[in-house]
Image (tube, rainbow, N blue to C red):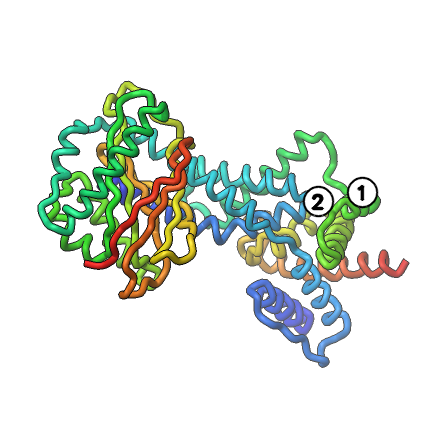
């Protein structure tokens, strides 16, 4: 009886190891009953099916959208500040951020015009497309007076510290404001999805993958992570926004990678 | 700012749980439902319910494994209830399903074997079927299975060992003729 119990316990332990992905070998000293039962357990393990990568990604996207929806419901209760106050805070002071602001104006015009084509029914404004290395975020942001972005900047630094090895070398943030009237209906969630590609020094064009969506006091921000080790000699990044909601790009921006 | 951080934290937690549990939930359901499309639909339902009710989940009451597989079990039960039929699949039916599959030969053989295993699994008592699904599909340990089924941990070990041997015998008998 005790021997049977021991055998049973060992059998279960071997199954646990098998399921954990370990290589398990059953010795010849074991009974045929034990060995064939274990071979059958191995067959059960090997015959299992896995979800397809497409299904896995689609479901993940859908669930993240649901999370976004819930976050928006909470955010709807927050009264937004004035868009003009927000714009006033975007006046850069340092040369680095003046360069960024030149890009910003282009994006502002582009996005503003496109939005007037009907994505949102009310007046909408702006934005920024800025190049931010982790170091620049810490030193340049306060100097630039980007008060409206302070929260996000802080979040960026924290994310980099938490992920360490996985910390992206470069993030591209695209932010925009939304209508400030709390009584207006929010845009559709599908309308908030952004997609982009990039290329470094004319190299291959690579999808950035999904952006992280952050809710700002006066709008939203998409952060695209470029998870590629970028050579110090790299000169420029071509960043292409391929879609924003129902609008289709491309909108291409050249961002210098040299100080 | 705190809301931004909370949202980011919720996303990270969700993403981690999703990566860990999606394959397990999928396999558990696939052990019970012999159809890829329905398995995907029900797996989606499980995660949507989990997301909706995550605020009600308390880790003091149960582990996340126990919680999400309780949802999975209920989703499958609801599915069969809605279908109004018993959860049995005939060997003829599985052969037909396999013959419609256009995947490569090795994948087809694997699928056929999986379907046969599911058919033979149906021949075991319900509780033994469930122990095997929760072990090999959900990858729960014996303590978690015991908690879900209201049995003792040692009892689960004994039943699992017995069920696998029984299933092996059924499989061998059927294969030999």
Q: Going 74% across and 62% down the picture, which residue do you hit?
A: B165
Q: Residue furthest front?
A: A202
Q: Position of residue B113 (x, y in %)?
A: 75, 55
Numbered disc 2: secondary structure? loop
Q: Chain of mark 1?
A: B
Tell me how far mark 2 sits from mark 1, CA to CA. 10 Å
Instruction: Out of A67 and B167, give the one closest to the viewer.
Output: A67
Q: Residue furthest bottom?
A: A29
Q: Position of residue A78 (x, y in %)?
A: 24, 28
Disc 1 residue crowd, few under 14, some 14–19, many 20+, Cα 10 Å: few
Residue A202 lies in quadrant: bottom left
Residue A85 lies in quadrant: top left
Q: Position of residue A257 (x, y in %)?
A: 25, 57
**Lateral position of residue B60 relative to residue A38, left or right:** left
Q: Residue furthest top?
A: A183
Residue A252 vertical placement versus A217 (above, below): below
| Residue B60 in view, yes or no | no
Residue that numbered label 1 is attached to:
B93
Instruction: Out of A103 and A60, give the one closest to the viewer.
Output: A103
Residue that numbered label 2 is attached to:
B34
């Amino acid at each position: 009886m005790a021997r049977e119990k021991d055998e049973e316990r060992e059998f279960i332990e071997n199954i646990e190891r098998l399921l954990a992905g370990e290589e398990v070998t059953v010795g010849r000293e074991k009974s045929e009953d034990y060995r064939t039962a274990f071979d059958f357990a191995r067959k059960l393990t090997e015959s299992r099916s896995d979800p397809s990568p497409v299904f896995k990604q689609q479901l993940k996207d859908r669930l993240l959208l649901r999370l976004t929806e819930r976050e928006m419901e909470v955010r709807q209760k927050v009264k937004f500040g004035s868009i003009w106050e927000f714009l006033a805070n975007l006046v850069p002071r340092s040369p680095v951020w003046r360069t960024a602001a030149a890009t910003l104006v282009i994006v502002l015009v582009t996005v503003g015009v496109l939005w007037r084509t009907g994505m949102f029914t009310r007046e909408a404004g702006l934005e920024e497309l800025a190049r931010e290395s982790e170091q620049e975020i810490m030193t340049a942001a306060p100097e630039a007076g980007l008060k409206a972005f302070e929260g996000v900047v802080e979040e960026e630094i924290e994310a980099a510290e938490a992920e360490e090895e996985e910390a992206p070398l470069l993030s591209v943030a695209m932010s925009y404001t939304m209508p400030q009237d709390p009584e207006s209906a929010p845009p559709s969630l599908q309308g908030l999805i952004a997609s982009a590609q990039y290329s470094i020094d004319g190299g291959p064009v690579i999808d950035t993958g999904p952006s992280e969506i952050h809710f700002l006091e006066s709008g939203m921000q998409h952060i695209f992570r470029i998870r590629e080790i970028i050579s110090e000699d790299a000169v420029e990044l071509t960043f292409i926004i391929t879609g924003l909601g129902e609008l289709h790009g491309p909108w291409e921006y050249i961002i210098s990678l040299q100080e | 700012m705190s809301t931004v951080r909370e949202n980011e934290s919720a996303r990270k937690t969700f993403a981690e749980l999703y990566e860990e549990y999606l394959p397990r939930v999928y396999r558990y359901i696939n052990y019970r439902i012999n159809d890829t499309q329905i398995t995907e639909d029900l797996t989606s339902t499980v995660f949507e319910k989990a997301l909706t009710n995550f605020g009600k989940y308390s880790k003091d009451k149960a582990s996340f494994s126990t919680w999400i597989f309780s949802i999975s079990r209920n989703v499958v039960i609801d599915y069969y209830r809605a279908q109004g039929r018993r959860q049995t699949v005939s060997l003829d039916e599985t052969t037909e399903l396999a013959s419609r599959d256009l995947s490569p030969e090795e994948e087809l053989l694997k699928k056929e074997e999986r379907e046969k295993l599911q058919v033979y699994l149906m021949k075991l008592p319900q509780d033994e079927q469930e122990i095997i699904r929760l072990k090999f599909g959900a990858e729960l340990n014996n303590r978690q299975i015991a908690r879900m089924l209201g049995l003792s941990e040692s009892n689960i070990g004994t039943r699992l060992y017995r069920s696998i041997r029984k299933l092996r015998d059924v499989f061998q008998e059927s294969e030999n003729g």
